[in-house]
Amino acid sequence: MTNNQLTAKGQLRHFLTIEGLKKPLLTEIMDRAEQFSGISTRHVKKVPLLRGKTIVNLFFENSTRTRTTFELAAKRLSADVMNLNINTSATSKGESLLDTLHNLESMHTDMFVVRHNQSGAAEFIAQHVAPHVSVINAGDGCHAHPTQAMLDMFTIRRHKGHFPNLRVAIIGDILHSRVARSQIQALSILGVGEIRVIGPKTLLPSDCETLGLHVYHDLESGLKDVDVVITLRLQLERMQGALLPSSREYFDCFGLTEEKLSFAKPDAIVMHPGPINRGVEIASAVADGPQSVILEQVTHGIAVRMAVMSMALGAQSELNEI
Amino acid sequence: MKLRIANGRIINPASQMDSHHDIFISDGKIIAIADELADFVADQTIDASGQIVCPGLIDLCARLREPGQEHTATIDSETRAAVKGGITSLCIPPDTAPVIDTPAVIELIEDRAKKAGRAMVYTIGALTQNLQGDLLSEMLALKKAGCIGISNGMRPIKNTLILRRAMEYAATLDLTLFINASDPWLQAQGCIHEGTVSTRLGLGGIPEAAETIAIARDLLLIEKTGVSAHFHNISTGKGVDLIRDAQRKGLPVTADVSPHHLHLSEHDIGNYDSLSHVLPPLRSTRDREQLQQGLRDGVISAISSNHQPLDNDAKLGPFAETIPGISGLETLLPLTMKLVDDEELTLMQAIASLTCQPADILGIDAGHLKVGSAADLCIFDPNSHYECKPNAFISAGKNSPFAGWLFQNQVSHTIFNGKIVFRQE
């Protein structure tokens, strides 16, 4: 299997999935995000790295946070940004997805930031764009959400420093979560000591153990001695299809409360990719509590996305001029 | 017309023949298999030196897209592809549009096939009206019109009472029931095998149980009703085990498998390769081995192409939105023979699974080389080497995951009713 997100020299061309990337590249993304994070607090929140570049946010699925942070990241890099929200029902056939793409491409777009409800959509688009166009995956179905994973890694690194000694627990709907898939891959590449997943069997992939994950079905044992607790958003449609009986029962078993959090290490941080369902997967007291870094994640999202966009558009050489 | 096929190595699994003779054909029939035939003056002689001569292949399941989707493929285009692949008889499942639930549709297909005149096209009638699973089709009328069996296609019957009645009725008429076993609920949300690859790619999985539950249910009703049944396109090792047990019990059941399930696995989906999107899905490597074992044991007695020609747009899109199916007519023989090269099957087993054994399942006088029988033959060159290039397929469907595979055993001639219907240029 070829990794078509990298150029022949191993530089980032597209950013579709964490799978197959090497540790130095992930570290480079985080280092670069570190440099960019200062810009947001400056008086003039802009650098001219992507001046004259056109970036299209192509969202086939609703999103507020991800789209806005991508938009802000692009604007802070001085790119021109266009937001397109496309109703998936209007493009239910593959050829019209390609038609949309080629139409936008003919407007001399340099980058597509794509969110789509189908796994593999970003990969598909990357296979069909012109050679000079980069594709950033902003979430495809249940497959991957690599910029979210990288902003999570960035957040963990800021709080915990090194990865190898950490125990990280991910709670909730792993089966349908593109965030969890990308996090697990990033954590593995960065050499985290132990990755745990906690949830009912209906929400865990059947072959978790073969992926090197430690599987738990209750928070008490699953959170013991953990450094990082990641709760996932529970899609409320999971009550359909008999995956769960009710959100109340889910909260009873897997909702992160202060009491449950006390099983983790005292200095454990609590993360959530958002948007939060308070009282479903996490109690307000925890989400707003001292161990929560949830809002920091959002802030970090801008710097990490600036890093990925600037790398993919080959602006490496100019970085030193910031 | 008198035709002589000279110097070929004749493989005729029906009589376990593997020897060098000439075949003499007159008026569409084989009149002798011998070294010489007195007073025979051939109008044409095919020199088959170094080549294998076997019965024309019989494919138990090929969709030709006519009637209903002539923009994708036609009986004419697909029978052309069939004979390029050495196939002289094939069966169309009932899910055409309109479905094969009236004699008129059977007549239309037979008429078009006769006009094409290259291969025998058999129809499998619909088990229920419009394949909707609630009213029985007029099976007697379909049988009289010439359908060779009965099936509900890729639309499993959910209601077990109706399935039982349909089996009883088919048994009354002595019609073989062709089954694509899948549990509609377990299959509903998936597009690939549930396993490590579905987890990695975030695609909905179809568990093995989607097939085994359906097979187990159907076998219990087959036992109860006594209907003869054939399972199409088995994809799991456990499915093979269930059928093996049923055969040991003496139930009248047979099964086939597709070449892609014998050669590929879930891992061939790679990064969302939609050409490997097929139903039932490509399973684990272990399933693949067990399917090969099932063939060796004779539990699975036929290999069928499960040909599904699609236009290019059907495969362009995010994986789950693409249409499942593989264009298989032109790769049936080379992929089956590859199992001989890989020492998974003997030459006799491989040819039998494409000729006399599917003929037995259908109960037709074909798939063998016999004096007095119709001269349907396939001649292929075991020493040929070529690269599989789907864009060069004759089939209107270029959708094959085997692009770039190196094949041997290219068909040089196909003969149907004594007439040369394909010749490799």
Image (cartoon, rainbow, N blue to C red):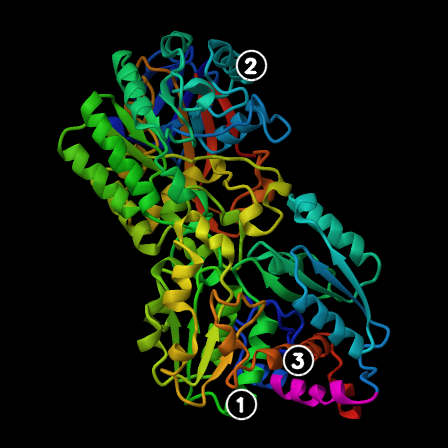
Name the residue type under label 3: Thr
Which is more foreground, mark 3 or mark 2? Answer: 3
Direction from residue A46 to residue B82 in the image, left or right = left
Q: Give coordinates of residue A241: x percent, y percent.
A: 43, 48
Q: Compared with residue B54, is residue A322 higher up or lower down, i.e. above or below?
A: below
In this rendering, does residue B298 appear at all? no
Distance of mark 3 from mark 1, alpha carbons? 14 Å
Could you say where residue A208 lies in the image, as x and y percent from the top left? 36, 66
Q: Amino acid at mark 1?
A: His
Q: Residue at x 60, y 43 (%)?
A: B391
- Foreground mark, 1 or 2, reads 1
Q: Secondary structure at mark 1?
A: helix
Dot 2 crowding, Cα within 10 Å, few <14, some 14–19, many 20+:
few
Mark 2 element type: helix
**Horizontal relation, residue B307 to residue A29: left or right:** left
| Membership of B364 in magenta stretch | no
User: Between residues A52 and B349, which one lies in front from this camera angle?
Assistant: A52
The answer to which of A314 and B44 lies nearer the viewer is: A314
In terms of image quadrants, where is residue A50?
Answer: bottom right
Residue underneath mark 1? A159
- Residue at the location (70% across, 79% down)? A311
Answer yes or no: is residue A46 visible. Answer: yes
Discs 3, 2 touching: Cβ within 8 Å: no
Give the residue displayed 42% in from the left and 60% down from the top: A248
The numbered disc on residue A299 is 3
Q: Amino acid at mark 2?
A: Lys
Q: Which residue is mark 2?
A: B115
Left or right for B372, reference A43: left
